[in-house]
Image (tube, rainbow, N blue to C red):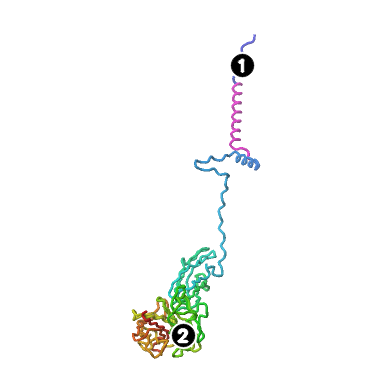
Amino acid sequence: MHGFDSRTPRLQGARLGNTQVLTLVVIVLVAVVGVLLFVNPAPKSALDRLKDEQASSANQQPAEPKANETAPDSVSTPEPTPQAQPREPRPQEVPLRLEPAEVDYGYVLVDQTRRAEVLIHNDSDYPVTVEAIHTACPCTDAEVVPRTVAPRGTSVLTLTYTAQSFPHVAPLRSVRLQTREYPRQVTSLLIKATVGREIRLNSDRDPLITELSGELLVESFDGEPFEVLLVDGREPEFVDFDPASDTPRSSYLVRYDFTQRPDSGIPRYLHVVTNRKSDPLAEIPTRFSDNFREQLMAQPLSWLAENRMVHVTFDDDTDTITRRVKLKRTRTEAGELPVVEADIRPATGKSVIGTATDRDPTGPAAATVEVQSVEPDPRKSGDFFVDVEFTRNPDSEPGLYHGILTFIRPDGSYTELDVVTYLTDGS
């Protein structure tokens, strides 16, 4: 019979407790290793990363479009930020270009004003500023807006042209633009115009008369009919026209003959009088050796009339007419005194002027002349405006009168002015 051993149950309990502890330790270690592997996995190769990126892109779904929004057909790639392009180097010459390059006003009546606009293009990458505008004569005013032409930009040049009071054929004028950036260079614009009166003489022929006798074309610029009243102060002699039976025309061919003048002199201009009330006088220059030499000799020492001729027409309701004459500075003589109002006057104080062209030159003159005032030109130092008053001579017969008005100063300098006076007969 086996005896009971009281240590056996205690030993078995101890062994069971040790086994449980060991098992628990193993479980904890496995858990720790798993956590470490999850938190810090082994690094992937470049190929694996590329595969993962491709798989991720394939699994992504496009977002649902919002209400009232159209889904794009494809995924757009953002535009790259534009890079500033380097500017071209500054040009060596003025980069301004005018459009048009010239202005032609066509036929312009005396004292008529025309306007034109010219575009100024800057063909460079740099601003250009118009510092000054030079015009060839006071007949043209010019303005540029804006004065600084932006890079690759445009400004506007506005021209205001007023035909001079003395008609001339096809004048050429220029407007020159001087810039701040190119002070030694200019950009030029050519201006063309044919200036004349309402009645034109020899428009399709020689603009000068160089023969003692011949034929002269007389026509209206607007094509309206008119009547020719006098040619060089005498009754007109027509070619292929009879004023007694034919109706008035818009153009005539008339004859002239300087050899039939009573004084046998040749005027500087041949004048034609018509029934155009707004502008009854028309003239054409004559060029002969005698009268051309006379014109060259009749120059002032220091001033020259801007317009060498004045037209004065008296009707029955007009007894006094005032004309403004501009005297332009030409040169200064040593010791010359400045011009003041009292210095410029007609040669005899109150002059008698105007000799009838169709009768004895010793007959009554057309008018008396007196200087009323002298004012300096505010736009140009040295130039002056002279207001001259013409008073009709009541004893003179109707007709065309031609005379020379001489302005004289105490120092002896002088200038001459042609004055053509027409006295109507009231008809």
Labelled disc at residue 8: 1
Q: Is residue 77 above or below residue 419?
A: above
**Relative depth, front residue between 369 and 286:** 286
User: In this figure, what is the number of numbered marks?
Assistant: 2
Whole-percent x, y for residue 242 in the image: 46, 80
- Residue 394: x percent and y percent? 33, 85
Residue 122 makes an appearance in the image = yes
- The quarter of the rendered structure image containing the C terminus is bottom left
Residue at image coords 56%, 62%: 87
Q: Dot 2: within a 10 Å radius of its alpha carbon, few (fewer than 14), some, or many (20 or more) residues? A: many
- How far across and how far down the image is residue 419, in percent? 41, 83
In the image, 325 versus 49, the foreground residue is 325
Q: Is residue 126 magenta?
A: no
Which corner quadrant of the image does residue 404 belong to? bottom left
> In this view of the protein, which residue sits in the foreground, 185 or 13?
185
- Please tell me how crowded label 1 is: few (under 14), some (14-19), or many (20+) other residues with Cα within 10 Å: few
| Magenta region | 15-43
The residue under label 2 is: 268
Residue 201, visible in the rendered structure = no
Q: Looking at the image, is 355 positioned above or below residue 24?
A: below
Identity of the amino acid at label 2? Arg
Q: What residue type is labelled 1?
A: Thr
Q: Nearer the viewer, mark 1 or mark 2?
A: 2
Q: Is mark 2 on a helix, strand or loop?
A: loop
| Secondary structure category for the residue under label 1 | helix
Instruction: Return the x and y of residue 368 as percentages of the image width and height.
Output: 36, 85
Is-magenta flag for residue 20?
Answer: yes
Q: Nearer the viewer, residue 25 or 365?
A: 365
Say whether disc 1 or disc 2 marks the residue closer to the N-terminus: 1
What is the CA distance from the residue labelled 1 to the residue labelled 2? Answer: 165 Å
